[in-house]
Amino acid sequence: MKKLLMFPILLIAACGQEEPVVCHNDSGFLITNVQVIDGSGSPAVPGSVRITDGLIAEVGELTACEAETVVDGGGQTLAPGFIDTHSHADSLLSEQPDAIAAVSQGITTVIVGQDGGSSYPLADFYAEFEENPATINIASYIGHNTLRSEVMGEDFKRVATDEEVAVMAEMLASELESGALGLATGLEYEPGIHSETSEVLTLAEIAATAGGRYISHIRSEDRWFEDAIDEIILIGRETGMPVQISHMKLAMTRLWGGAAATLEKLDSARADGVQITADIYPYEFWQSTMMVLLPERDYTDRAAIEEVLDQIAPADGIWMTRFEPNPDYVGKSLPEIAGLMETDVISAFTNLAEAAERWREEHGRSAEMIIATSMKDSDIEKLLLWPAMNICTDGGLNDLHPRGAGSFPRVLGHFARDKKLMSVETAVHKMSGLTAEHMGLSDRGLIREGMIADLVLFNPDTVIDRATPEQPELLSDGINSVWVSGELVYQQGATTEARPGKIIRRN
Ligand SMILES: [Zn+2]
């Protein structure tokens, strides 16, 4: 800490005079000729940034020190490395430590342990990562569904007893001690879908007491959306800790056009002192299992499927992105598959879900993934603009949804620049400074003296996503260079050999 404070003073003393410059920066470099967007939302300022020992040492109009390595930014934009508050990168990170799908978007930190599912115990995950680090930094929540599975096993389709909740609470406390950011729930998924609010609240109190926070794939993004929003507001109010809605959606026809009303409700909770925030990925379609569409999990219920196709996810907006029982269906829409089966879309849905469930029971893991279109662009735009909304991907490193490789450049290029929805400074703020606040990270997310030198250099005129549902792996354009702790990890389409990623523990 002392060293961190010393640097700016030393360098100012050496470089700040009119006399010949005799400063040294042997353990760093200078990025010159850039528009600095510092992540706070403030306007871009032309200048340079000096990096020393992996930290940002100076920002401003700087002259190179003697023998200092200089990186000419070519007039492009230098921003804090982006932070992804809802990432599934953890599942493949040990196999793909270059994390190119993330780092090629300018992402330098991913927050994992989402939707109620995390590694357990986190200490093992941290140790594994530290032995085999990645390009990017990683922080994790501890998942409610993970704890519930550990405690209740296969007998989870019921309310937990007080004793079971007490065991979960004990495990949670110990994981928070290890450095988990807080508690993550996934209340639309098993086994959390069977929990009562009181169970979640008891656990949330433990996280609050430890100084943690709460993040949630809420109980419903469609049929019971309003109740689900009320539940997370209640948790924020009762515990007093920050709560964040994951990948916010208005995913049902009756909710379309309702973004303003929903945000009004959230704003009034905020005005009452509830620290509620949210994240979003910029696509009208999501990716999950088929069964998430059927809360009763009954794929033989034709009326329920009809309601889904009518009000939540139209058949021609559903594509199969993974289907273990018959990979031939991958890339095909539900009507196309129904055609191959020579049946109607409802029966096709039932057949697919039944085959997927059988396969899952046999193999012990999920058999299928679908992309389903259920949002309106106009709602997405309103949600993106909400001042307490930050950007996430909800993506994995090999995602079948384009969000995994395209989310951040899509906001910068498509929404901010082309649609002029917001300034590039606001977009960057929603990817860095605001995000760091939402996750409680105090030493990242801003270009300021003393902050960790996680940085992205991009061309605001050309930055754009290229990933599509057909080619979800396509990397974005316009992200020029990415540094993590002052080490170059990505440049013009390729990762370097550097693996400076760190585990970020709750401080
Ligand atoms: Zn989710």
Image: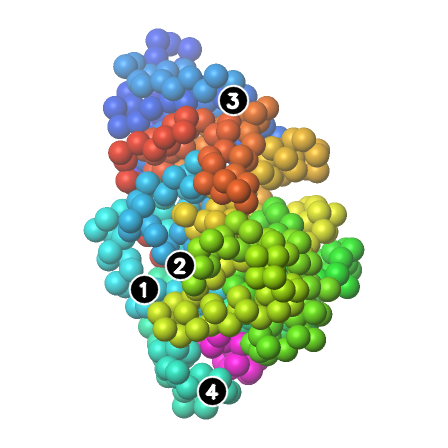
Separation of disc 1 and disc 3 at Cα?
A: 39 Å
Whether tag 2 and tag 3 are in contact, CB under 8 A, the answer is no
**Is residue 182 one of those drawn in magenta?**
no
Q: Is mark 1 within 8 Å of ligand 1?
A: no
Which comes before the other along the chain, label 2 or label 4?
A: 2
Q: Is residue 103 left or right of residue 219?
A: left
Question: For the residue carrying disc 1, how many other residues have a C-alpha within 10 Å: few (<14), some (14-19), or many (20+)?
Answer: many
Relative depth, front residue between 480 and 467: 467
Question: Residue 374 placed where, x, y %?
Answer: 67, 56
The secondary element bearing badge 4 is classed as loop
Disc on res. 140:
2
Separation of disc 2 and disc 1 at Cα?
A: 8 Å
Separation of disc 2 and disc 3 at Cα?
A: 32 Å
Q: Quadrant of residue 498?
A: top left
Q: Amino acid at mark 1?
A: Leu
Q: Is residue 150 left or right of residue 425?
A: left
Separation of disc 3 and disc 4 at Cα?
A: 55 Å
Question: For the residue carrying disc 2, how many other residues have a C-alpha within 10 Å: few (<14), some (14-19), or many (20+)?
Answer: many
Image: 130 above or below 56: below
Which comes before the other along the chain, label 2 or label 1?
A: 1
Q: Amino acid at mark 2?
A: Ser
Image depth: mark 4 or mark 1 in front: 4
The secondary element bearing badge 3 is classed as loop
State the extent of the magenta-drawn residues as a range.
Answer: 190-206
Question: For the residue carrying disc 4, how many other residues have a C-alpha within 10 Å: few (<14), some (14-19), or many (20+)?
Answer: some
**Is residue 203 one of those drawn in magenta?**
yes
Q: Amino acid at mark 3?
A: Gln
* Colour scheme: rainbow
Q: Amino acid at mark 4?
A: Ala
Whether tag 2 and tag 1 are in contact, CB under 8 A, the answer is yes
For mark 1, what is the residue? 122
Disc on res. 160:
4
